[in-house]
Amino acid sequence: MCTQLYGQVQDKRISGKVVDQNRSPISLATISLYDHSEKLVLSTATDRLGKFQMKFDQTGRYFVKVSHMDHQEQQSAVFDGATIDLGTIMLKPVASKLAEVTVEGKKKLIQIDGGTLIYHVDGTIGGQDVSVLEALKRAPGVYVENESDITLHGKSGVQILLDGRQTFLSGKELTDLLKSLSSNNLKSIEIINSPTAKYDATGAAGIIHIKTKKNQVTGLNGTISSTVAYGISAKQLQNVALNYRKDKLNVYGNYSHTLGNYHYLYGTNRQQNGKAYDSHTDDVDKRQKMSTQVGVDYKSIAHPSLYSFILPKKCHGDLV
């Protein structure tokens, strides 16, 4: 006798709308989802109509915090992990007067420039030594389903730009490209909810603009960084970036690798119907990550637009 069981995890959705005291929608308000231990699970931002939507697939008890510049932060009641509509959330203005302005040189993790939300990946610790796809998952409002479909605020059909140019890829091909690129070469990720006329008509859900680090200095220049780490086993991280710019021609390339094993300890310990279940797993990831990228930019005289091609490559292997 043979029995087969099939199951599928149903995504939970949290939605709502954020307005001010005049009932006007507040765009780019930060919506943060926390679990019962006050650990941040994910975050997003409202669109131009003040609406938001988040999707997650974990069970538990959660609450939501809503914040926006010059407004008091609001927090929802604790609820079980399920599809829920928070309705209309009204934010009250801060009843304080501005005494002085202090300008600091430290770059913020997230900046808002008009209708564009800028996520500075190079200023985060969690965004280093991972793939561009993993760094993109940490951006506000971005959700990757089944490692193939990239959505923005719960909407599919997002246009992905790489250094101002369309990738002309979608689905698994696009995520494979983002997996092959290292986040060590990322400068920022720009999330454009309402694209202006200068962008192509495609991408009704919005635009995600991925910017890599490029040196604007003429001539040949480059950077080399090397890191050695030890946690249960030794690891070595290497990143090399070269750039040659002359007149209207720019040739650039980079190479990075992560060598070493990563150890994971996880398990479950629960009691149900008078029975105890205790399981522990010791997992070792032996995949060695290596990636390269080569690109050429040329700015013509007749057409000031930028023409370029990018050749990414990534290798995985086990070292015995």
Image (cartoon, helix red, strand yellow):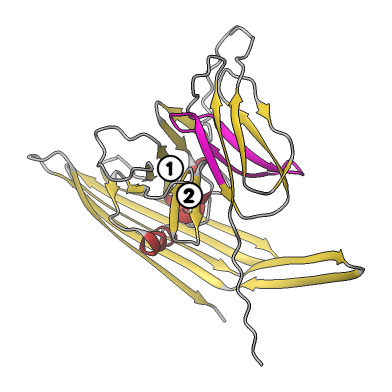
| Amino acid type for the residue under numbered disc 1 | Ile
Could you say which disc has been placed on residue 136 in the image? 2
- Determine which quarter of the picture holds residue 91: top right
Q: The C terminus appears in which quarter of the rendering?
A: bottom right
Left or right? Give the position of 275 relative to 16. Answer: right
Image point 50% across, 57% down: which residue? 145
Of 250 and 316, the residue lying toward us? 316
How crowded pointer 1 is (Cα within 10 Å; few <14, some 14-19, many 20+) is rated as many
| Amino acid type for the residue under numbered disc 2 | Leu
Of 117 and 44, the residue lying toward us? 44
- Determine which quarter of the picture holds residue 101: top right
Marks 2 and 1, the one that precedes in the sequence: 2
Left or right? Give the position of 53 relative to 188. Answer: right
Q: Position of residue 56 (x, y in %)?
A: 60, 51
Q: Position of residue 307 (x, y in %)?
A: 19, 49
Of 6 and 33, the residue lying toward us? 6
Q: Position of residue 302 (x, y in %)?
A: 7, 40
Q: Position of residue 169 (x, y in %)?
A: 31, 58
Left or right? Give the position of 13 relative to 77. Answer: left
Could you say which disc has been placed on residue 189 in the image? 1
Q: Is residue 12 above or below residue 235?
A: above
Magenta residues span 28-54
Image point 32% across, 45% down: which residue? 203
Q: Is residue 29 a member of the stretch shown in magenta?
A: yes
Label 2 residue SS: helix
Q: Is residue 263 a member of the stretch shown in magenta?
A: no
Labels 2 and 1 touching (C-beta < 8 A):
yes
Q: CA distance from mark 2 to mark 1?
A: 8 Å
